[in-house]
Image (tube, rainbow, N blue to C red):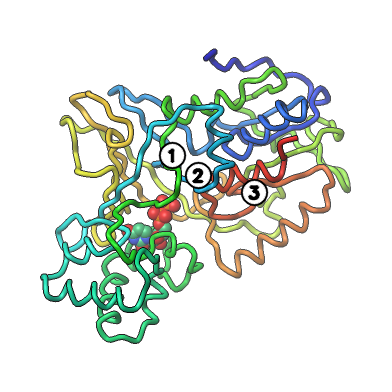
Amino acid sequence: MATLTIPKPKDCYMYDYVIVGAGFAGAVSANLLATHHNKKVLVIEKRVHIGGNCYDEVDENGIVVHRYGPHLFHTSSKEVWEYLSRFTEWTPYEHKVLAHIHGKNVPIPFNFNTIEALFEPTHAKQFIQKLSQHYPQNAKIPILELQKNPDEDLQQLSNFIYENLFVHYTAKQWGVSPHEIDSAVTARVPILIGRDDRYFNDTFQAIPKHGYTKLFEALLYHPNITVELNKDFLTEVCWQEKRIGFRNDFTCKIIYTGAVDELFGYCFEALPYRSTDMVFETMDQAYFQEAATINYPNDHDYTRITEFKHIHPNLSPKTTILKEYPKEHCKEITVPYYPIFNDKNQEQYTQYMQKAQHFSNLTLIGRLAEYRYYDMDDIVLRALNTVGIA
Ligand code: UDP
């Protein structure tokens, strides 16, 4: 496939759409508008690369790394899978995660195998029997639900899981307890009534064969699409009462995928996000750990270590690992990785959303623009549904 060339900047009025951000929300929207609606699209990206937080590259050891944290593609949407499959081949990949608990690396989501790894056999059998009596096979029970079960054994088990898997990890990740964040967050990693050790159980699970960056190049490679990298939309944005403009042009439609509070100059205060320091290390050994990701709920300041060779196999005698240190987001300084979803923040977001609705040529799509904890496939689906295949 030909490489993406970045044409010289042109005046905005030549475009039907200006799309802010070249992550999944922006790249899929641009592709749909260019290919299915025959629109001329300008994509403005403030980073020096496309792909948003999915950006991957080959590091100095020849190993493919995900610069903004591990991205494992999984979806149960046939529509999303088929759409993306036009732009990449896939390598089948099912993500396995272990958690370091009481000195052992045990599988999560917490399941029957985890119970047997952590408890002596009689006790383990009792817990498994109780779970099987109370819940259907393969059910996924959020920890905050399991804690409501009055059965004495299940109380003991849920307290153990809460204390050893969730409470300290969540404190590191979000700075609060699991009860202070939206219950959907911890429900992403439920207790599984069975032995499925996979981190996700979606129908389609794979990694783009030539990496995410190549997938984005293919999405954006179209004569109707111009990409400008290293350009901050906000330095050239302009406003009228009911329209948003770019480079003094108010005729284009604008799809904005960045942080909505930043777009409006934090007029209703900054929305809270969590950020993460991504610390990469090279180890002078072929492999460092036994799984792609090991979570450390109770030890260290980092939440997890990911070893990329498990995701992108490679014969290098060295290996690259990533430690993630969550921290508070500092506006315009750190990367806003995770919106903090709770009622108060949602209300604050609603104010921004209502303000955005005053601008007839503005659409917000994506994790930051919609202040939602979207996975990659959710964002692709949002773009497919919003822009549409003509
Ligand atoms: N979580 C936890 N312990 C774990 C894994 C997850 O407490 O070992 C909680 C934590 O609150 C986390 C949430 O479950 O933020 C969702 O985890 P997930 O792995 O889906 O987070 P992501 O990969 O999006 O960072």
Residue tagged 2:
335
Tell me which amino acid carries mark 2.
Answer: Val
Which label lies toward us, 2 or 1?
1
Write down which quadrant ligand 1 falls in.
bottom left
The quarter of the picture where residue 48 lies is: top right
Tell me which amino acid carries mark 3.
Answer: Ala
| Image position of 121 with respect to 239: above or below | below
Residue drawn at (39%, 41%), measured in percent from left and top?
70
Residue drawn at (62%, 47%), measured in percent from left and top?
259
| Image position of 358 with respect to 13: above or below | below
User: Could you tell me which secondary element the residue under label 2 belongs to?
Assistant: loop
Residue tagged 3:
369
Residue 270, position as x, y percentages in the image: 62, 56
Residue tagged 1:
68
Q: Assess whether mark 1 and mark 2 are in contact (beta carbons under 8 angstroms).
A: yes
Q: Neighbour class for label 1 at 10 Å: few (<14), some, many (≥20)?
A: some
Residue 256, position as x, y percentages in the image: 69, 41
